[in-house]
Image (spheres, rainbow, N blue to C red):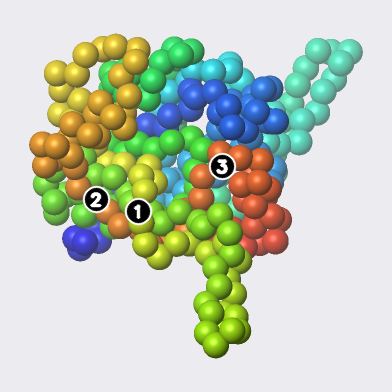
Amino acid sequence: MGEEIALPPGMQAVILCGGQGTRLREETEFKPKPMVSIGPHPILWHIMRHYASFAVKDFILCLGYKGEIIRDYFLNYRAHTQDVYLDLGQGTVEALPREISEPIDWRVMLTNTGLDTMTGRRVLTALEHVEGETFFATYGDGVANVDLSALLAHHRCMGKLATVTAVHPAARFGEMSLRDGLVTSFTEKPQVAEGWINGGFFVFEKRAFADLPARDDLILETDVLERLAANGQLAVHRHEGFWQCMDTFREMQLLNTLWSQGRAPWKTW
């Protein structure tokens, strides 16, 4: 891992928000998965809050399925997050000021990247709004306590076109250590010690997407990352800390339990 550095001003984060989230149909029948709540806020807010804690406050949201709900949330952000006074007779709406420890000063680009577009094309479309040569990217359905400064430092140290954060997924079942007919230790659903998966939280150079066809079926994982890996241009940043996606109702419950108990490891702000 390279030496940690302060993130340069103006770094942007592209967040994929367009998928249909079919494995969480209990929620996504009515809203896009990034808008499924952890506590009082959608998971998308938690992801953006993590980036903002590293001074990354310029976001490009790739909208698709039910994107109008995400658009409405940010267009009416104060109304969604603050106390609101309505005068129905006068037809006026006033968001009441509230003391908050850290004001939200994000800049958010809402870009429609298509209803059935695949992940690679969504990022490709977002590139027209990326101002620098290097940018962050991630999925809109997973939280982690990834050190973004260390991630960017490692990306620059490796000098490749892209860096992917590798994580240990949580085990589906509890893990037991056995000896002499006894259970010597029991851990409920730990992070697995072996095996790495794509955890999102990428760093890309724009050149990573050069010469790619602008097809709606362009997939980030197979058409972009596999090509970069085959060409020796995909570095890996190993993250040993917390990471959890929200693919299922059980995972949504887990994240909400951690938040309600004040034990949310991804809360870096």
- Residue 246, label in figure: 3
Quadrant of the rendered image containing residue 27: top right
Q: Amino acid at mark 3?
A: Met
- What residue is at 59 percent from the left and 53 percent from the top? 101
Q: Secondary structure at mark 1?
A: loop
- What residue is at 56 percent from the left and 54 percent from the top? 172
What percent of the width, then of the height, locates residue 257? 69, 55
User: Mark 2 or 3 closer to N-term?
Assistant: 2
Q: Quadrant of the N terminus?
A: bottom left
C-alpha span from label 2 to label 3: 22 Å
C-alpha span from label 1 to label 2: 10 Å
Check the image and name the residue furthest to the front. 181
Residue occupied by mark 1: 196
Label 1: few (<14), some or many (≥20) within 10 Å?
A: some
- What residue is at 35 percent from the left and 36 percent from the top? 137
Residue occupied by mark 2: 236
User: Closer to us: mark 1 or mark 2?
Assistant: 1
User: Mark 1 or 3 closer to N-term?
Assistant: 1
Q: Secondary structure at mark 2?
A: strand
Label 3: few (<14), some or many (≥20) within 10 Å?
A: many
